[in-house]
Amino acid sequence: SRSLIIAIDGPAASGKGTLARRLADYYHLPHLDTGLTYRAVAHMLLTKGWPLDDEAHAIEAARLVDLGHLDREGLSAHTVADAASRVAVIAEVRRILVDKQRAFADRDGGAVLDGRDIGTVVCPEAEVKLYVTASAEVRAMRRLRDIEGRGGKADFDEILSDIKLRDERDMGRTDSPLKPAADAHLLDTSEMSIETAFIAAKAIIDDAI
Ligand code: C5P
């Protein structure tokens, strides 16, 4: 059977991760959340107390990233997310992680990958590319509900400014900035439930394959 690569990009808290997991499940494809690879590098630096702009150590950490051992729970803190967007500007870190991500995508049968540069850099030949967005306010509200749903507390304005800062960093960097690939399908989920977004994405994919 031919292999299907589904590339999903979008800003923080756009719902792309949830969508990617549901699509992977539906199409029986392995899924890689590439954000976890940048988070793993950041987490290693934070744990060792190394500065986030220490390129030599960041590169060493990137080499140690093992796609089979990415601990979603352990990497979920917003301090880790913020640190990830700082190590993600280091070109050599990106090169090393992109190699690992491509190896995952190139497996027989295909894969679903989500991140910031999947359609533009990691898998430019993907059969289907989705660019998932939502307004910053909607994304901040989703994140807040998510935190509160798990019994935590957070401040809407703080989350919103966090999200805007990370958008700026991800869209403004020179190496692999976040942007839709020329042939990406845009999916604005501001007014969509998870179910509606899934149905819309499925329609785009079934039409493309
Ligand atoms: O998707 P997630 O929020 O886990 O990503 C954390 C950070 O990792 C992003 O803000 C971004 O700076 C970086 N990242 C990236 N390229 C990817 C995935 C994530 O630069 N493909």
Image (cartoon, rainbow, N blue to C red):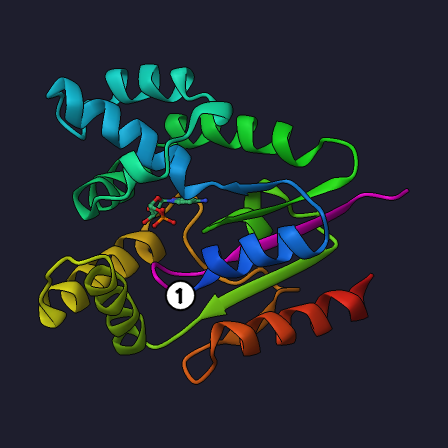
Q: Residue furthest right?
A: 1
Q: Residue furthest bottom?
A: 191
| Quadrant for the C terminus in the image | bottom right
Q: Is residue 193 left or right of residue 93?
A: right
Amino acid type of the residue that numbered disc 1 sits on in the rendered structure: Ser
User: Callout 1: 10 Å neighbours few (<14), some, many (20+)?
Assistant: many
Which residue in the protein does label 1 denote?
A: 14
- Report the residue at 46% width, 77% height from top: 189
Q: Is residue 207 left or right of residue 118?
A: right
Q: Is residue 36 above or below residue 163?
A: above
Closer to the camera, 65 or 155?
155
State the image coordinates of residue 130 (x, y, percent, origin top left).
Answer: 59, 63
Q: Is residue 97 above or below residue 171?
A: above
State the image coordinates of residue 194 (x, y, percent, origin top left).
Answer: 49, 72
Magenta stretch encompasses residue 133? no
Closer to the camera, 147 or 128?
147
Q: Is residue 48 above or below residue 82?
A: above
The residues colored magenta run 1-14
| Quadrant for the N terminus in the image | top right
Would residue 188 be visible to someone looking at this image?
yes
Picture quarter containing residue 128? bottom right
Closer to the camera, 98 or 187?
187
For label 1, the SS is: loop
Q: Is residue 143 left or right of residue 79?
A: right
Q: Is residue 201 above or below residue 48?
A: below
